[in-house]
Amino acid sequence: MPFLDRHDAGRRLAERLRGLRDPKTVLLALPCGGVPVAYQVAKALDVSLDVAIVRRLTVPYQPSLVFGALAEDGSVQYDAEIIERALVSEPERVAVTREQRVQLRHTVTRFRGDRPRVPLAGATAVIVVDGLDTAVTARAGIEMARKNGASRVLLAAPVATAGALRVLTGVADRVVCLETPSLFGSIRPWYRDFGEVAEAEARALLVRAADDLEVGARTSTVGSRSESARLTR
């Protein structure tokens, strides 16, 4: 069944992730499309939301074909099969990777500014996407979360190809996916509204998620104090 939009996909995905409602859970959205999905999950589970910034490495003259991914910690994942099939030369691979390192720094600055990443040491990290046609970008996010100390790393997707899930099942500790169609042309047909998510919108949702979590924590503290006072009367 198609999703109305990314927010609808997030609400439905949250139902499958209820068991992760824990202060040690951190959602890591792949921007920009994964942020609205992850925002709804974070809101439902009352957990922290951050981004795992990953840049796709695409084949020259074939920008729809992804041969690798570069994560914000500098780690790179390459798809050897795509590189061989698309005849990506070594100089081309190096040039694309170098260019995307520059773009990655700009993207990190725009998304984070002076705000530090949510700590992952000992956390259950959940990589959240709006859909997967290949495994390479999600794999880069998973590996980055592990390198930053996450004790468990999960992948959550509304829709994905069976091939991508096979790869990621061997990398993530758990994979949660709502739809795995046998015929998969692209992600877009699985959403009635699959408009582009602007960076400004994604950043605003990250701020809103942090505010929601802070308000929830204050409310919980006040409630606990009130209950304690009532019991000591």
Image (spheres, rainbow, N blue to C red):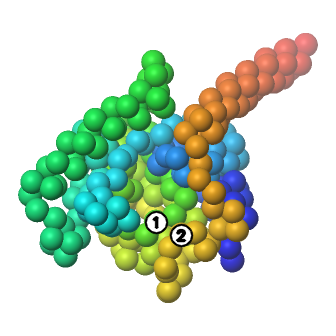
Residue, far front:
61
Asked if residue 180 shows in the view, the reply is: yes
At which x and y percent is residue 215?
73, 25
Rendered image quadrant of residue 64: bottom left
SS under mark 2: loop
Q: Quadrant where the C terminus lies?
A: top right
Q: Is residue 125 left or right of residue 85?
A: right
Q: Earlier in the sequence, mark 1 or mark 2?
A: 1
Q: Is residue 180 left or right of residue 121?
A: right
Rendered image quadrant of residue 90: bottom left
Mark 2 — residue? 187
Asked if residue 20 shows in the view, the reply is: no
Which residue is found at the position 69% from the left and 54% from the top?
Answer: 7
Mark 1 — residue? 132
Q: Residues within 10 Å of mark 1 (few under 14, many from 20)?
A: many
Say which of marks 1 and 2 sits in front. Answer: 2
Q: Residues within 10 Å of mark 2 (few under 14, many from 20)?
A: some
Q: Is residue 153 left or right of residue 198?
A: left
Residue, far left:
90
Is mark 1 in CB contact (under 8 Å) with mark 2? yes
Q: Considering only vertical position in the picture, is 2 above or below 112? A: below
Number of numbered discs: 2
At which x and y percent is residue 93?
16, 55
Q: Is residue 153 left or right of residue 38?
A: left
At which x and y percent is residue 55?
35, 47
Please state which amino acid type lies under the numbered disc 2: Ile
SS under mark 1: loop
Which residue is found at the position 67% from the left and 32% from the top?
Answer: 208
